[in-house]
């Protein structure tokens, strides 16, 4: 038996995390770099005491809301391509429950985050402890069981020595390119403070090797045969391209063989916008170029995509009856989607392998002018959207503001962060990425409240560039707690708040399906009808003043000149800023050759609704079934 060291479980967790490293392509980096936490009785004495010690290299950040700080940790890991992560610790009960949404977000988007919620007493002696639920049918169920549904790995450390297997399993999942997501280790508050003689070896520096999945020769041959048989193939640039750091190889592949590509939200900015094969956004929130080429493609080559409804237009987009799908992915679950032909491999290795085979065969796609024409037509449309000052109702256009930011006001290295509302759609369509890794969109869970909180994590990951969280008024109100954490820590982020006084995109969806405006506008309840119908007086909110109240520099803008001035001054600010832009509720982009399956009612008193349902059914009939 080797040497042992007597530590509390809390101290063991901290010591272990401090010694975890990853190696990717020969580069070794510290994996867990910090911990976000909100202390309560369920964690301040155990893990809190261990963090307070100065014998470790983990940066501690006090959060303001558990969901918010977990979003910051997720933003940090996503911007670091999953090679650096943060842990997040909370108390028992409400503190833990607040974090469940963030766990789901991380798992959906395949982003590693280590959640360390406190848990009620394992010994059960003082039960019920403050904030304990007490499930009548099992004393073994606590708030933390809610994490089981939304995490990739879940464990409860009921004895201090269990921490060893739990932590190793946590690392297995957190460092996996295919199976990563949220990991929850529930830490009962008594066990956190209990001591055990841990083997010293357990805390030695451990390097987890993140391996690229190597494609088999036969799988490469099969894939190459599919491509050579194709005249009009199209690539999908998914998040896997980003995490594989395969942007260069992806672009080279596309250009060598004349295969155009559409971008997903997660893949966008792996390759810059003006790459000659880049058709821009694909699917529901895509543009005309990618959607047009997709509808005729005879082979769709998905690289690292989850093939969500937004990417495939609810399986409706690819209309060529002879279309075949080739899926390149490291994740078996994704590979089996849509009856794809499978190439299980890391994106970079797959593209390099295919490049060799296709070059040998002298392959080139059969497109003539379609790609340049589709691109030119789409860029013309983006220019039009960028230069139109007003929206459908005569107010300042959201797209004009985005255009100014994109073309004139932001440095090309600046990172934009978003997640929900109309902005992800607008950004996927019109945002021209001039540098790689400058587009950070959470559109797997599309969680309102991610934007600002995640931007704090993004800025910790990239202190050298300006970070802009783009957020609607609804999402701002939903969650921006870590703006205060940013101020507290001297982390500068810029919030750009587009105020249309409504849940704009949902209001749009409602109206598009024949339902009159209802419950989506930030308006006073009508004194006449007692309802939240259309036409109510807008509730005026001064968001800039709210931000100033926290200590930010803030501006309110209603036109391009004010927007220009605000961004210029915000750049010069050394503390976090908020730029509130009043925008026309009808100034977001529409649809460009796409469709989205939604749950329109089959029966209704309103003909407009049943008509919309009939139209929906006509399109459902055209969509693939699996
Ligand atoms: C946490 C969460 N709750 C609800 C939703 C559903 N939802 C999607 S977008 C949206 C409205 C967003 O409004 P706002 O942030 O003002 O953006 P806008 O659409 O007006 O641009 C809602 C309620 C969501 N995505 N996330």
Image (tube, grey):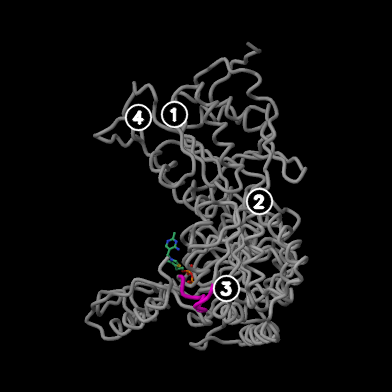
Q: Residue furthest top?
A: 1
Residue 89 lies, in percent from the top left, at 52, 38
State if disc 4 and disc 3 touch (CB < 8 Å): no
Helix, strand or loop for disc 4 = loop
In which of the image's four quarters is ligand 1 placed?
Answer: bottom left
Task: Name the N-terminal-most of marks 3 and 2.
Answer: 2
The answer to which of 335 and 537 lies nearer the viewer is 335
- For label 3, the residue is 282
Residue 50 lies, in percent from the top left, at 59, 27
Task: Name the N-terminal-most of marks 1 and 2.
Answer: 1
- For label 1, the residue is 188
- Compared to residue 497, the image places residue 526 above or below, namely below
Considering the whole magenta stretch, tell me its main secondary structure. Answer: loop
Tell me if the residue at label 3 has its CB under 8 Å from ligand 1.
Answer: no
The answer to which of 589 and 554 lies nearer the viewer is 589
Crowding at mark 2 (Cα within 10 Å: few <14, some 14-19, many 20+): few
Quadrant location of the N terminus in the rendered image:
top right
Residue 51 lies, in percent from the top left, at 60, 31
- For label 2, the residue is 216
- For label 4, the residue is 129
């Amino acid at each position: 038996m080797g040497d042992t060291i007597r530590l509390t479980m809390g101290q063991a967790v901290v010591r272990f995390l401090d010694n975890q490293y990853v190696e990717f392509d020969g580069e070794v980096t510290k994996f867990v770099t910090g911990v976000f936490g909100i202390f309560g009785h369920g964690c301040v004495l155990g893990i809190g005491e261990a963090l307070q010690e100065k014998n470790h290299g983990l940066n501690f950040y006090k959060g303001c809301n558990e969901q918010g700080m977990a979003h910051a940790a997720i933003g940090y890991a996503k911007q670091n391509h999953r090679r650096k992560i943060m842990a997040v610790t909370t108390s028992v009960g409400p503190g833990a429950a607040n974090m469940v949404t963030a766990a789901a977000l991380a798992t959906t988007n395949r982003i590693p985050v280590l959640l360390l919620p406190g848990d009620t007493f394992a010994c059960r002696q003082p039960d019920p402890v403050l904030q304990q639920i007490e499930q009548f049918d099992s004393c073994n169920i606590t708030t933390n069981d809610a994490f089981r549904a939304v995490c990739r790995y879940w464990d409860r450390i009921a004895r201090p020595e269990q921490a060893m297997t739990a932590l190793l399993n946590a690392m297995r999942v957190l460092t996996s390119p295919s199976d990563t997501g949220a990991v929850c280790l529930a830490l009962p508050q008594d066990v956190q403070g209990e001591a055990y003689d841990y083997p010293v070896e357990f805390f030695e520096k451990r390097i987890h090797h993140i391996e690229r999945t190597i494609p088999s020769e036969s799988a490469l041959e099969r894939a190459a045969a599919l491509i050579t048989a194709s005249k009009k193939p199209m690539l999908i640039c998914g998040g896997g391209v980003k995490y594989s750091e395969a942007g260069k190889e992806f672009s080279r592949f596309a250009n060598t063989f004349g295969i155009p590509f559409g971008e997903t939200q997660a893949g966008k900015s792996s390759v810059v916008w003006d790459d000659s094969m880049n058709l821009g956004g694909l699917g529901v929130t895509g543009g005309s170029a990618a959607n047009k080429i997709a509808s005729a493609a005879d082979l769709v080559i998905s690289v690292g995509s989850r093939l969500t409804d937004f990417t495939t237009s609810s399986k409706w987009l690819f209309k060529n009856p002879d279309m075949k799908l080739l899926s390149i992915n490291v994740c078996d679950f994704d590979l089996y989607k849509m009856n794809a032909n499978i190439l299980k491999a890391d994106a970079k290795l797959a593209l390099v392998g295919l490049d060799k085979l296709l070059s040998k065969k002298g392959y080139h796609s059969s497109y003539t002018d379609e790609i340049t024409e589709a691109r030119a037509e789409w860029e013309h449309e983006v220019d039009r959207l960028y230069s139109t000052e007003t929206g459908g109702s005569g107010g300042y256009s959201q797209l004009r503001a985005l255009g100014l930011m994109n073309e004139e006001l932001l440095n090309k290295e600046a990172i934009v962060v978003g997640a929900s509302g109309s902005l992800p759609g607008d950004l996927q369509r019109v945002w021209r990425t001039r540098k790689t890794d400058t587009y950070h969109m959470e559109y797997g869970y599309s969680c309102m409240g991610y934007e600002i909180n995640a931007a704090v994590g993004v800025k910790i990951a990239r202190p050298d560039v300006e970070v802009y969280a783009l957020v609607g008024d609804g999402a701002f109100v939903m969650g921006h707690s870590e703006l205060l954490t940013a101020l507290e820590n001297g982390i500068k982020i810029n919030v750009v708040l587009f105020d249309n006084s409504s849940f704009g995109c949902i209001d749009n969806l409602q109206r598009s399906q024949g339902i009159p405006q209802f419950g989506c506008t930030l308006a006073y309840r009508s004194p006449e009808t007692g309802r939240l119908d259309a036409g109510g007086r807008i509730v005026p909110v001064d968001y800039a003043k709210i931000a100033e109240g926290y200590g930010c520099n803030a501006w309110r803008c209603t036109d391009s000149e004010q927007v220009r001035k605000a961004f210029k001054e915000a750049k010069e600010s050394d503390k976090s800023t908020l730029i509130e832009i009043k925008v026309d509720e009808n100034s977001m982009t529409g649809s460009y050759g796409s469709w989205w399956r939604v749950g329109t009612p089959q029966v209704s008193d309103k003909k407009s609704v049943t008509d919309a349902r009939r139209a929906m059914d006509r399109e459902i009939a055209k969509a693939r079934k699996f």
